[in-house]
Image (cartoon, coloured by chain):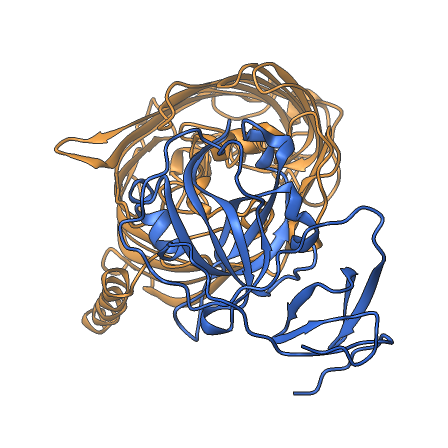
Chain colours: A orange, B blue
Amino acid sequence: MMNRGWKGVGIITLVILIGLFLIPKESEAIPAFARKYGVSCAVCHRPDPPRLNTLGHRFRKYGYRMPEELGKDPNYKEIGEYIAMRGRGRYEYEKFAKGKSATTSRFKWNDATFFYAGSMTKNLSAFFEWEWEDESEIGLNGQFSWFMGDADRYLQLRLGQMHTLTRVGWAGFDRPTGISTTNVLSTDIDSSAVPFKINQDQRGLEASIGVTKDARIIAQLLNGLNFAGDGNHGSQDDDTNKDFLLAYEQNLTERGTGFTLFGYRGVWHSGAGADDVTQYVFYRTGATGSLVFPTPFYADLESEIQGGVMYAHDVPPSAASVPDNVDGIAYWLGAEEWFKNNASVFGRLDFVNPDIGPDKWANKYVLGGTYHLSDYLRLALEGFYNAKENGTDSAGVTTEAMFNF
Amino acid sequence: MRKVICFALVGVFFFSASPARAEYLRTSLFAIELNPTEFYEKNVEIQAYFYKEDDLWVESLPESSKYVGFFLMKPQKDTLSLQEEYFGFVFAPKEIKDQIRLLRKGDKITLRGRCFEFKSVSMDGPGIEVSQLLSGWGKEARTIAQAPFPKTKSIVSVSQEAPSVPVGSDASTSAVLSPKVGEERYQLFLNGKAYQGLRFGDDYVFEGAHFRVEKEKGKEQ
């Protein structure tokens, strides 16, 4: 069975690789904003959508405005400049260590997502995202933001149910080049009962202060997670406590080198009841960075080294029969090569140790590549190996076709 | 070819005119974007689809008040296309904005003009300063607007180089459409589209039909 499964994976991989290198490529673009600004997608995305380059990140920071548009009312043309659709189809294969778990081999429609985004007035912007996910739920993000100032010094207020720092931040907090987000940002990195992941969408208010065009301070006041550990579904908020996020983001070069420092303090209740039985206080602190530079001996190409580290500290309820404070640590380190024809290859190591004392580390090794075939289609391939000290090892492949139009 | 023209006193005619004498390097937007430096400060001729008028990038020009901007969609090589490509750095003298506004999304147009290095706060890239705008492609192309000459100043003030590959035009030109103050205008309905602000006595090409409307009946050329 295993041989047959790997044979299928090999065939799919071969087909994608042939596609990557044989299909002619001349151009690229993004849907709504390409239509609005008359530019190709490479203007804002590097190496491939959805990951942003420096200009793309500025555009997002300015509330979906080019620097030229700041302080001016948008010149509305048509609805097609505000709406876009995305669909992501995948094939996933994962084989676990012998006898431990059933092999996975499946086609998956990851999501179908409808976007409405852009600047409405010279100050007001909106971003709406309706994402139908594999779990048959509608993942909703909706936010309004108010921008004041100019490109070098500004204040932007953002209110809504939104991406907090992951997927809208920088130097590791933007979307991944490949398919998977690093485990550091997408998993619970300690072993306490708190089901918190730094990349969860939440409801709240953000003040973003641009101190230069390349540096900003981000402060967020958030509902936090409900009893079920969710930040954007179900009850609006199960307690009156609020979570806080503070971050500093600095871009250093036009190529995209930069870093982000962040701290998060949250309160989570495991259910209704007295605080001394149900209330957890948790902290996340860390730093991420990205170094983008011309590839040695190939000045036309670019390379990136990206990494980040996050430390977790959870304080359980004082009267609960749970272990003392739980500390976890996680980091990732990756290297990428960006080619001229909208393609990239990358490798990444994710390390998560959810309990520093007993040492329950888990590593994930990722190798992959992406290719932006056309305006509408990006192909990606990832191979991975999970090595767990206290769990089941596994290896697999994920391929993805992402449609944008 | 059936054309429905809902206006009285209309004379439709097909005309021919003398070939254009200007020399342009016939190329494509793809080629210009791929190797822009090869085209800077050269006269180019490109074919594209009209997309929309937009002045977003005009304000980055040194003399922005003298220009209007519009976007193009690139022609696709393949019948089955997975992409729509846009090109936004196209600038034309304001004198021909009325003619530009007669164009509709998807109209085939041919541009002749100078390729230059466009620079804005956001980005750099190849831009085109239009000197002649034609409706249609290839042999069917007809001039619908031409920038006034001699121009006083280019967008980027550099000396004009002779084109490296001169190509004779296979298009025909019509009379240059110059705006006249207080002139009476008319409206044309063609295949369900409304074309407004047209002038009596001027030549137009819409959807492959070449015509002129005279105030007197039956005055065809």
Q: Between B12 and A382, which is closer to the camera in this rendering?
A: B12
Would residue A84 be seen by someone viewing this image from the given angle?
no
**What residue is shown at x 73% (from left), y 77% (from top)?**
B191
**What residue is shown at x 28% (from left), y 54% (from top)?**
B165
Q: Residue furthest top?
A: A211
Q: Residue furthest left?
A: A297
Image location (x, y in percent) of residue B153: 51, 31
Q: Between A333 and A359, which is closer to the camera in this rendering?
A: A333
- Which quadrant, please, contains the C terminus of chain A? bottom right
Task: Give the number of callouts.
Answer: 0
Image location (x, y in percent) of residue B133: 55, 56
Viewed as shown, does residue B8 lie left or right of A67? Answer: right
**What residue is shown at x 70% (from left), y 51% (from top)?**
B98
Q: Between A323 and A142, which is closer to the camera in this rendering?
A: A142
In this picture, is A157 found above or below B95? above
Image location (x, y in percent) of residue A203: 69, 34
- Which quadrant, please, contains the N terminus of chain A? bottom left
Q: Quadrant of residue B57?
A: top right
